[in-house]
Amino acid sequence: MTEQNQRKKISGRPDSRMSEELDVLILKTAAQLFGEQGYAATSVEQIAAVARVGKQTIYRRHSSKESLFKTVIAELGQSFLVSAAPSEEMVSTDPLLALRNTMRMLLDLVLSPETLSLSRTFIAEGWRFPDLVDHAGAHIFDPLEELTCKLLGAVAKAGLLKEGYDLEGTSRMLTGLCLGSPHQQMLFGRKILLTPQDRDAYLDNAWAVFMTGILAPPAPVRSGAKRP
């Protein structure tokens, strides 16, 4: 291939794989800069420079900085669901284990550096950009609460919960204890739960405390029946 043909190939429209890789690069760079510098202080020009792409390359994919930021948030929320949601087979076979495994996976995700950085951006600038906070609620918090409520509902359907609990309220309290408290402490700069072992121990304790209150006691063994 001649040098002229090589230049034509490079300057032409990228194939689908290259386009997908470029999308990932732009979103990863944007997430990093939004987390490090905040929303207001980050410009599309900066993102383009760090990603080493043209500014118009970004604008062809995202009409504005706000649109780009919303896409970053939506992708983060989707990655949470893809990583943490258990299989339907596990939910039907052992819903309690499925719920616990989901909490453990989400604990890693909410304590990741990327999540913490973006959370600090929301805290610092949310009052200036309430629409972005609403977007995060719709694409991160609400779907995770729905997932937790769905799994807790499967636990209830299996007859493992005491009667009288509101599933939505109970699932929010569960996520608050297992995820919200560690996330908040890390946002305040406390160096906690830094190792997998620390996180395992924390979740074991939080899980035991919470489930002691909501799980139904085992059914009594009838007289004459054989114990398993």
Image (cartoon, rainbow, N blue to C red):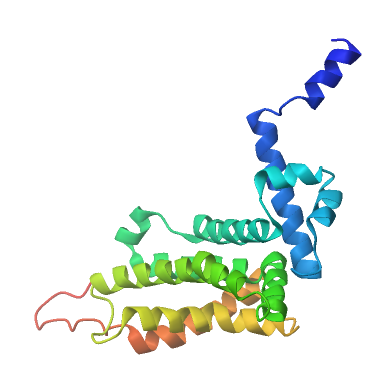
Q: Indicate the quadrant containing the N terminus: top left, top right, bottom left or bottom right.
A: top right
As drawn, which residue projects farthest toward the right?
3
Residue found at x 77% / y 70%:
38
Residue found at x 38% / y 83%:
169
Residue 158 % position (x, y): 25, 70
Residue 39 % position (x, y): 74, 68
Mark yes or no: residue 194 visible.
Answer: no
Residue 196 % position (x, y): 65, 69
Mark yes or no: residue 149 visible.
Answer: yes
Residue found at x 62% / y 81%:
182
Number of numbered markers: 0
Which is nearer the eye, 98 or 187?
A: 187
Q: Indicate the quadrant containing the C terminus: top left, top right, bottom left or bottom right.
A: bottom left
From the viewer's perspective, is 27 left or right of 172?
right
From the viewer's perspective, is 174 left or right of 93?
right
In this rendering, the answer to whether 172 lies above or below 110 is below
In this rendering, the answer to whether 221 lies above or below 148 is below
Residue 70 % position (x, y): 61, 60
Residue found at x 44% / y 72%:
145
Which is nearer the eye, 164 or 10?
A: 10
As drawn, which residue projects farthest toward the top?
1
Which is nearer the eye, 63 or 47?
A: 63
As drawn, which residue projects farthest toward the left?
224
Instruction: Report which quarter residue 2 is drawn in.
Output: top right
Which is nearer the eye, 43 or 52?
A: 43
Instruction: Report which quarter residue 131 is drawn in.
Output: bottom right
Instruction: Report which quarter residue 23 is drawn in.
Output: top right
